[in-house]
Image (cartoon, rainbow, N blue to C red):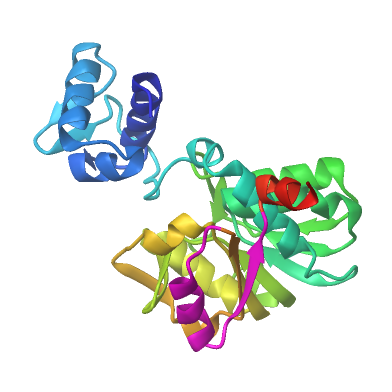
Amino acid sequence: MHETERHRVILSAVQERPVATVAELVSLTGTSEATIRRDIATLHAQKRLRRVRGGAEALTPPALPGLAGRPFAVNQTLNMDHKQAIAREAVALCDDGEPIIINGGTTTFQMVHPLASRRVQVLTNSFPIAEHLLKHTKNTVMVPGGALYREQNIILSPFENDMTRHYYARRMFMGAYGIAPIGLMENDPLLIQAEEKLIDQADELVVLVDSSKFENRSSLVLCPLERIDIVVTDDRVTDRTVSMLEAAEIRVIVAQTGAARRSDAG
């Protein structure tokens, strides 16, 4: 990640929480602690943030607490070919007329393009997914009420009894921070709360993750592997990971990337 991009990620992160720690920024940028400390010092000297012990904070504290994790705009640029291939396989599971749930995320966002040729009913807490489907497709779109978190572009409701409880879905499609033998992992309690409500409304849970997510770990477990029905991932997934999922009786769909498909065609 180039310095300019790192600075953008750091400045975004400090706007979303009271204090962004060095460890969090290392995780977000994939760089070293020494590099992050130098970046913080540079941005502090430029008066773009305030350096504090163990991390950094915004010059103007955020009015609404943010969520852990990379901003949507940053995640959207990562592993794009794999996310698009995964999304195509996910949409292939849908039948016209079905009610589905699509949780916010950059992999699930890629479903909007193949959905342009379908006619389904969609409940989504993703502002960009809802906006794209409304503008460019004939699908029916519903969104829950709540606060819009700008960096992640998702809508989260603090209320237990919102419209989510009145929606039935054949399948829910969602991404995740990570998957391990213990289960599906997220890195923010607010996301856990919102996703639990959505999962309860669907017959089947379909998880869309590129193969890098099998290396990620978090202290927060959303649900055990046994709750997942289908995992759609890319062709870099290892045999060991596939065996782990199949041992939990999860159907595994491996999406071929554009490069792999072109190679096969040749």
Taking the image as shown, residue 217 lies to the left or right of residue 46, namely right
The N terminus lies in which quarter of the figure? top left
The quadrant holding residue 213 is bottom left
User: What residue is rendered at 42% in x and 43% in y?
Assistant: 70
Start-end of magenta stretch = 236-256
Taking the image as shown, residue 21 lies to the left or right of residue 170, namely left
Find out whether residue 239 is within the magenta segment: yes
Q: Position of residue 182 (x, y in %)?
A: 36, 79
The quadrant holding residue 60 is top left
Q: Position of residue 199 (x, y in %)?
A: 58, 75
User: What residue is rendered at 39% in x and 46% in y?
Assistant: 66
Q: Looking at the image, which is closer to me, 91 or 15?
A: 91
User: What residue is rendered at 77% in x and 62% in y?
Assistant: 91
Q: Farthest residue to the top: give it.
A: 46
- Please determine whether, in this image, residue 235 is positioned above or below residue 137: below
Q: Looking at the image, which is closer to me, 79 or 141?
A: 79
Residue 18 in view, yes or no: no
Residue 124 in view, yes or no: yes
- Please determine whether, in this image, residue 219 is positioned above or below residue 21: below
Find out whether residue 202 is within the magenta segment: no
Q: Looking at the image, which is closer to me, 109 or 159?
A: 109
Q: Looking at the image, which is closer to me, 44 or 175?
A: 175
- Please determine whether, in this image, residue 109 is positioned above or below residue 38: below
Q: Position of residue 93 (x, y in %)?
A: 78, 70
Q: Farthest residue to the left: give it.
A: 53
